[in-house]
Amino acid sequence: MIQWIKQLFASSKTVSDTDSKKPEVHEHTNNNMKSVSNKFLIVGLGNIGAEYVNTRHNIGFKVLDFLAKKENLSFETVKLGTLAEYKFKGRTFFLLKPNTYMNLSGKAVKYWMDKENIPLENILVITDDLNLSFGTIRIKPKGSDGGHNGLKNINLILNTQNYTRFRFGISDQFKKGQQVDYVLGEWDEEEKAKLPERLELAAAIIQSFGTAGLENTMTSFNGK
């Protein structure tokens, strides 16, 4: 009996010693870790109606229409807009054209962001920009609305400016007091001739945003 008790204590001591020599394992919580999502919401800003199709203000719609045609995608009428789903390299891109008119674009963005559970960092908003020369690309991770009514409403509804915007330059070649007519006017012949190449570049930017990430996309395309 005494011998058996000695063996029992010896066994316990061995296990205890072994445990004490094990490396410490620190479990990580998810509190400071962002979830990885392969879903992206690409929002092209514009106004609905045939009279706006070829206007400068509708470049967001035009970019998405170009990508959809290039990839044989179809837009479907959905709540607060039209939507096409694009699969590319393991990612899913939801191409959204809000039908709320420009100054209420935020409603559509918020609805589809929540419905598809898409994180803020996976949203890309395409808009026209008067402060950039025609066709110039500027991708930014955040910023003010710059006087753009579409961005202004998105900022308001999302309660943040921290989402990626893809600004497409339309230049400011208009006379004083004619800004509205210029923005809602159609592309001139020279611009029309250059648009296809710019739209091809815009399609590549969308793909890059979802596959290469924001930083790499900015480095590769800003200023082009």
Image (spheres, rainbow, N blue to C red):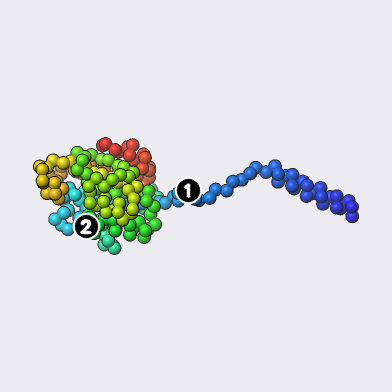
Which quarter of the rendered picture does the C terminus lie within?
top left
Q: Name the residue under label 2.
A: 101
Q: Distance between the residues labelled 2 and 1?
A: 36 Å
Residue at 14 percent across and 49 percent down: it is 180
Residue type at tag 1 = Met
Percent position (x, y) of residue 73? 28, 55
Name the element at disc 2.
Answer: loop
Neighbourhood count class around disc 1 (C-alpha, 10 Å): few under 14, some 14–19, many 20 upward:
few
Instruction: Tell me if residue 181 comes above or below residue 194 in the rendering.
Output: below
Q: Which badge, 2 or 1, is on the more N-terminal residue? A: 1
Q: Write down the quadrant of residue 209 in the picture.
A: top left
Residue at 17 percent across and 53 percent down: it is 53
Residue 199 shows in the view: no
Percent position (x, y) of residue 7? 84, 50
How many badges with numbers are in the image? 2
Front one among 195 and 117: 117
Which quarter of the rendered picture does the N terminus lie within?
bottom right
Front one among 80 and 54: 80
Residue type at tag 2 = Tyr
Instruction: Tell me if residue 49 comes above or below residue 121 in the rendering.
Output: below
Percent position (x, y) of residue 89? 38, 48
Neighbourhood count class around disc 2 (C-alpha, 10 Å): few under 14, some 14–19, many 20 upward:
some
Does the residue at mark 2 contact the one at mark 1 (Cβ under 8 Å)? no
Residue 105 shows in the view: yes
Q: Mark 1 points at which residue?
A: 33
Residue at 36 percent across and 60 percent down: it is 115
Residue at 26 percent across and 44 percent down: it is 167
Left or right side of 133 for 12: right
Left or right side of 123 for 16: right
Percent position (x, y) of residue 23? 65, 42
Name the element at disc 1.
Answer: loop
